[in-house]
Image (spheres, grey):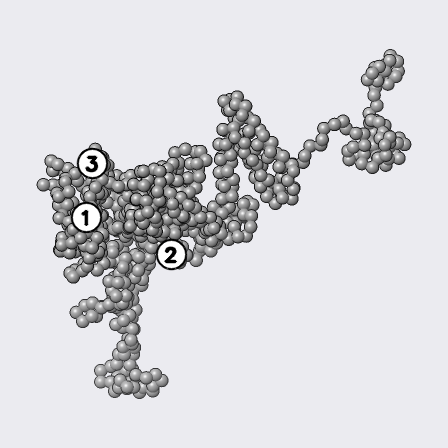
Amino acid sequence: MPVGQDQEYWAALPTDEVGRAIIKRVEEYYGYIRKVGRLSLWRRSYDYFYQSLRTGGRVYYTGEVDEYTNTDVADYRNILLHLKQMTTSQRPAFEARAVNTDHKSEAQVTLAEGLLDYYLKEKQLERYTDKCVEYALTFGDGYVELFWDATAGDEYTVEKKEDKESVTSLGEPGEIRRQGELLARTYNPLDVIIDYTLTSDIDHDWWVTRKFKNRYSLAAKHPELKDEILNTSMAVEEKDTVFGMQLTEPSDMIPVYTMYHRRNEALPDGRIVEMVSADAILAEGPLPYKDVSIYKMSPGTQTGTPFGYSVAFDLLPLQEALNALYSTVATNQANFGVQNIAVPLGHNISITAITDGLNLIEYDPKLGKPEALNLTATPPEIFNFITMIEKKMETISGVNSVTRGNPESSLKSGAALALVQSTAISFNSELQRSYAQLMEDVGTGIINILKDYAKTDRVAQVVGKANKSLMKEWTGDDLTDINRVTVDLGNPLTRTTAGKVNMAEQLLQAGMVENPDQYLQVLTTGKIEPLIEGKRAEMLNIKAENEELSEGNPVPAIFTDNHAMHIMEHKAVIASPDARRDEGIVKSVTEHMQEHLNLLQSTDPNMLLLMGQQPVQAPPPPGPAQPNEGPAAGNVPEGLIPAVGEGGPAAEAAGISMPSQPQMPENPLTGKQFDPVTGGL
């Protein structure tokens, strides 16, 4: 009966029946990819990607008497590796998203982003995502699986706790257990069985993964199934579904199948089944994760199918033609590279007369002289065709000559090279988007699994190279507010060496680079985090202070704060009518802002200038102004200050040059000067 026509859902069958249903799906999947030629396509791509292994890394000979010299060139592998390098060379910038924007959530965001970088780099999960990109380019699809291994990690002793649930999850008090660890695997499409009847790649409900494990290790771990495990072998019809060396008997490695089913109406709790055969079920139960933690990457999609499509499939015939042309040239040169000598019939020239150089050769003019035959000349059309195919492969893949390290002579400036190289990256935008989606899925999966299973205190380096000494103790409970992860791959120009140089120079001109070490770090890593991490920490502290101030709690200010920034951001706390009606909030905010202002006035101006802040002069003490105060009267003896509008001897004695002041007008009735008191009457 065809898949999907059973009266009872196969994935919901009881344990003693579900194994046969899973094996049936595996067999039907392999039968399908054989029938439609997809298995053959994947094998050809694998062979050309590793063609030096296929030929033993040598020139090889074919023909009835080995008259043809064959040589393979690695343009296919070179182009795919350049596509991989352009995609993965710069580590993605993870941005964790929290459900709230309070200080606690913001602190969890910082921790989550640091943990993602820690797990991908220090725990080397990044090598699995890189391998997934390689699989996706070579076969059209690549997969990454995340899982929690409770038997891995450091040992710890369970402590007695008040929370009974915590004791149950961690073990009994005094028991020695392992912390567990987040691990990953990478699969090619031969090792992930899917529902091939789907018409798109977004409707999967189940996956079956295949991995190979040592039968004796499995038998020791599952002694109740020892006989079934030791008697298991790979089916004959499956042996062509393994890349590389074929698994033939005797072999200690046997396939282990794991079926993952997501939660839906048919299986509300989801399901996981691990097995080596229909009669040897190793584990079975509800899905242990928030969702199925298998993540796929495809450079493109084949419409109407759940399978991906890669530019590699378009390069295969061109690579085959290129190998044939190079072999033609090699055959001609190998067969005729040693000179052949033509002599007339009846000649009297011996072979020994021409084997060494500088020989005096006598010949009969009537018979003619010996002549070398130039048979090594290869038609120029062959070389032109080789060049045409190589350029066509670059055009189809978007990997230009600059990217491959062989720029055209017309490209001389660094800006031009950077622009051409970034164009190659932009051309493969669909590959970039697929990689970004993979990293987002993997990042979100890492956080979700850590939230559920990292229950013991552990230490991680969470800030990267810019601050190596900062270590953070954490548990999964410190990530409860993180709900998803997004990825920013940045401008394609910043992924090139020339682009990084250009970016560093612009930052230097903008005054954002404060010391040479920062400039060199941006230049070598292409990251601007070292330039902004101080400002980011300041803003995080301001948010924490705003939360305290909004509760009416006093918050101290210190002289190292960026006082202007603090004052501007603290205004937001009392920027609502409700807050302004609360005297406690208004008091705490205004007193805190006044404290910042006082520090701006009292802190050593040199210290403020070193921190990039402008000192503020303290106001003069209150009281009546004295006649001899001010810069104009600095050394003027008392009583010598001239009246307004007057100069004369007093001003001259004081050494003060007073400007000429206008005279008050005369009263036309009395002829006297206008007086503010009498009016000139």
* Res 269 visible: yes
Q: Amino acid at mark 2?
A: Arg
- Quarter that holds the C terminus: top right
The mark that comes first in sequence, 2 or 1, is: 1
Q: Is residue 129 left or right of residue 541?
A: left
Label 1: how many residues lie within 10 Å, few (<14), some (14-19) or many (20+)?
some
Residue under pointer 3: 267
Specify whether residue 233 is in view. Answer: no
Q: Would you name the residue on which mark 2 appears?
A: 404
Q: Which mark is residue 666?
A: none
**Amino acid at circle 1:** Leu
Label 3 sits on what residue type?
Leu
Q: Residue at x 45, y 35 (%)?
A: 103
How many residues crowd mark 3 within 10 Å: few (<14), some (14–19), many (20+)? some
Disc 3 versus disc 2: nearer the observer: 3
Q: Hey, which quadrant is residue 360 in on the image? A: bottom left
In the rendered image, residue 405, in percent from the top left (x then y), is placed at 40, 57
Is there CB contact under 8 Å for labels 3 and 1?
no
Vertical side of 643 occupied by 273: above or below: below
The span from disc 2 to disc 1 (Cα, nearest Å) is: 48 Å
Please identify the quadrant where the N terminus is shown.
top left
